Image: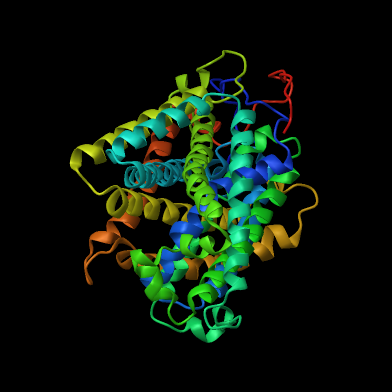
Amino acid sequence: MPERAGAGAAVNTTHVQVALARRTLTPFGLWALGAAASAPLVVLAGGIVATYATTKVTALPLTFVLVAGTVALLAVGYTAMARQLGHPAAYYGILANGLGRGWGVAAGLVALVAYNGIQISLYGLFGATMAGALGGSWWVWAGIALAVVGVLGVRAIMLSIRVLATVLGVSLLVVAVFVLAGLWQPADGEVSWAGFDASGLAVSGIGGAVALCVAAFMGVDAPGSFVEEAIDRRSVSRATVAAVLVLGGVYALAAWAMGIAVGPDTVAEVAADPAGGLPFAVLERAGGLWVALASVALIFAVLTSMLAFHAVISRYVFAMAREGVLPVGLAHTGSTTRVNAPRGGSLSQTTVAALVVGAFALSGADPMAVMFTWLSTVGAMGLLCLLLAASVAAMTAPASVRGPQPGVWQWRLAPALGVLGGSVVLVAMVGNVGSLLGAAPGSLYPFLLPAILAAVAVAGRMWAGHLRRRRPEIYAGIGRGTPKTHAIPDAIHVSI
């Protein structure tokens, strides 16, 4: 029986009594965080085009539907645990209470690597995009983006939400116009349903398509890290699952419209040709204004996605530092009584991002082919593993965590189905990691990514073992969650 953190754990006398801005985020704010992290316009302009080009899977719309269903099932157990525990470092708290403290620390470190991988990869995408459009070095543009995200990251979350929601609204509008433009002028003269034909799944590239579709949904789990700041904890579940289902529908429609616009049989060829101009060539049918708006919105969508992941990472650092697993000073930064934003975590993430971007710039590595592709892949793989582990933790969670009236669906059936489907997806992702990274056939180099994640998990277990031997008071408080309600008085906030 694994040792879990919980009500029976010894009191950690070194637990830092600081809290985030409670009762601040509405269900819409939580939903916007998850949807903005996933960045629908980035998926349209980059993910869908790249998936068609590299996998040649015509049933990509159906693939998005199936992957969305799997991620939604995995999100049920994850959010049920997150809601009950109220821990900003969601995976860390979930595994600590469901599988044991050692697994919690391992999950926390893997989450930090995965979220940082995705967030920092976007600096490569942003820098390359801006350099291609306006000239200059990609790392200069990446540095500008890093400064913007760093400044917003230390501010209260309300400001970030307003920026995220605005850019998300424009992005969804552009995607909607793209879908209408594609359906209005079908390449073959009629609307084709080939994108939803199940026979299109039985092709060699389906594993890569599944892996790329999974990457498109990474970030929708963000609301779980804001449970301490939510007005209603129950909204975390609704916001997360709603984000998965809404985005799944959006991505499926966008992929379907792209196939119709240029023809299901030729969409892979057109997507692989830079002269094809997807998706902007289709948007141009609605008018040049939409192309210009999409180009500008795409830049801001990348920025807001970075900002959303930055906010999640800073909360992981803050929460783990508050319990002494990371340096306690990272939880004290800003105020000795309460913090509206986890400034220590924010500043540390900005520092890490600056160092990684600088290292890639000095090495001369390609910001897209190397930095963006490799870091985003390791991030997506890590977060999928964590979602699977969270579902297992939900199924094994003790009654003290599940509450007096646990539901069979959210604590047993949905997590079990999610683990079944998610395991298939993970195998497809690991099996196709070489093609995703453009490695030569037979190369073992791409398997360095899952090896890195495994090594980080082992390091987490070893650190937890060290704390158990040398700092038992810290070990006893792993995953305990937020301070007691009356230990830290709430500040007055304006909800969004």
Q: Is residue 370 left or right of residue 247?
A: left
Viewer-nearest residue: 233 or 470:
233
Q: Is residue 431 above or below residue 27?
A: below
Q: In which quarter of the image is residue 408?
A: bottom right
* Color theme of the render: rainbow
Which residue is nearer to you in this view: 444 or 250? 250
If the image is split into quadrants, where does the C terminus sit?
top right
In this picture, residue 206 sits left or right of residue 293: left
The outermost residue toward the right is 405
Number of marks drawn: 0
Q: Nearer the viewer, residue 310 or 45?
A: 45
Q: Which residue lies furthest to the left in this view?
A: 363
**Residue 367 location in percent, x, y?**
29, 47
Residue 350 image offset from top left, x and y in percent? 41, 30
The residue depicted at 23 percent of the width and 64 percent of the height is 444
Please give the name of the residue rendered at 64% of the width and 34% of the height, measured from the top-left corner. Answer: 162
Q: In this view, does 239 lie above or below 65?
A: above
For the point 72% across and 18% down, the residue is 489
Q: In this image, 203 relative to 194: left or right?
A: left
Name the residue at 47% across, 32% down.
149
Seen as rendered, the residue at the extreme top is 336
Residue 221 place in picture, x, y as percent:
58, 49
Residue 250 seen in the current view: yes
Q: Is residue 324 visible?
A: no
Q: Give the answer, above or below, for where 266 lies relative to 481.
A: below
Q: Position of residue 154 (x, y in %)?
A: 52, 24
